[in-house]
Amino acid sequence: MLKRALGLACIMSVAATSVSAADDYPTRDIRMIVPWAAGGGTDGIVRKISDLTEETLDGTMYVENIEGGMSGNGLIQLINANADGYTLGALTYDSVITVPWQDMLDGYSVDNMDLIARITSEPDALIVPDDSEYDNFEELIDAAEESPGEIRAGIQNMGARTHLTLLQLMDETGADFKIVSYPGGAAPQKEALLNGEIDFAITSLGDFSGLIDSGDARGLLEFTDVQSESYQEVPPVTEYDLNVQMGSFIILAAPSGTPDAVLEKLENAYQEAFESDEFQEWLVDVGVTPNWLGRDDVTEWVKDTQDEIFATMEELQEEGIIEE
């Protein structure tokens, strides 16, 4: 009886300590891992919302860029961090789709993390330099038919989302492009486009918003069925009767096992920052679609998304469009 009482007292003491720690959270700086290079779209969005979240959370957050492995290097550090709310991470398409699909990390799964929220969704787009000879998408496809394999398409990692988007486009149109890979996210793609290394890039308009706004680049189409509010001059791909819809998203996550009270505090703080006029107006300015899903919904959404895209990739493998 005494042992049982002592055990119960111990459990109650641990629970009380956990609640107290959550009440005091945060008591030190929070590290946010962005598994892509500084200067890309994901980096900018995560920095912006984290700056606003600091005000609500009454604590300091700092972003650390950990590049490599299609976000895998950063993910390793995230899932191995202490589950105490002081290490968070930003997941993108590659974190949710490419890395598990290609089995790049032994034992890796989204199940190794507690998802906090999805904050944006961004369709991919086809982007050319402003002085491009192609005024519209039809002209680009016509040129590709005349010169197969000569027009240079800049993607990010081979086998990643932008590569899949391009492969689907080539399959639907019959166009043959020369594929040039720029690992590390949108930042090296921007440099390549400006330097004339590629004729067009595949990524989101938000990733290239700075170049588009400055007049150095322009979009030819978005791989979505919805007209962009930020870039109304860029038509959706469905305007050309093509069924190629693909894009990325940003999900905020913590290591699996993070206390529920801490996750709730983070979710509330990020949601308040997300709903602020400053963040909403900033997203429109940079051409990104705000798209919130909280803890109760984002995990199920990720599972459904994985099931759908994995099925598409299996079909492409069977058709010989992508390698096994």
Image (tube, rainbow, N blue to C red):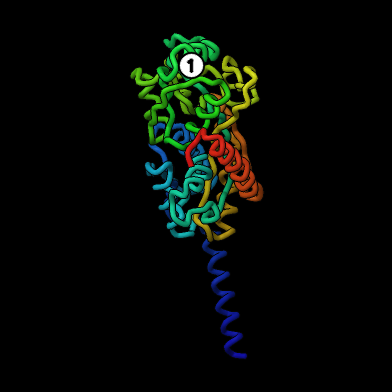
Quarter that holds the N terminus: bottom right
Residue 123, position in %: x, y? Answer: 56, 29
At 39% from the left edge and 20% from the top edge, which residue is drawn? Answer: 198
Residue occupying image coordinates x 52% and y 56%: 112
**Which quadrant would residue 278 be assigned to in this image?**
top right
User: Going 38% across and 35% down the picture, which residue do you hit?
Assistant: 183
228 to 95, vertically: above or below: above
For residue 299, side relative to residue 154 (left or right): right
Q: Is residue 165 visible?
A: yes
Instruction: Give the residue at the far bottom of this rendering.
Output: 1
Relative to 228, say whether 320 is above or below. Answer: below
Which of 217/29 is in front? 217
**Which one is in front, 79 or 322?**
322
Disc 1 is placed on an element classified as strand
- The residue singled out by tag 1 in the image is 218
Residue 322's spot in the image, x, y percent?
Answer: 49, 36
Q: Is residue 31 above or below residue 22?
A: above
Q: How many marks?
A: 1
Q: Residues within 10 Å of mark 1 (few under 14, many from 20)?
A: many
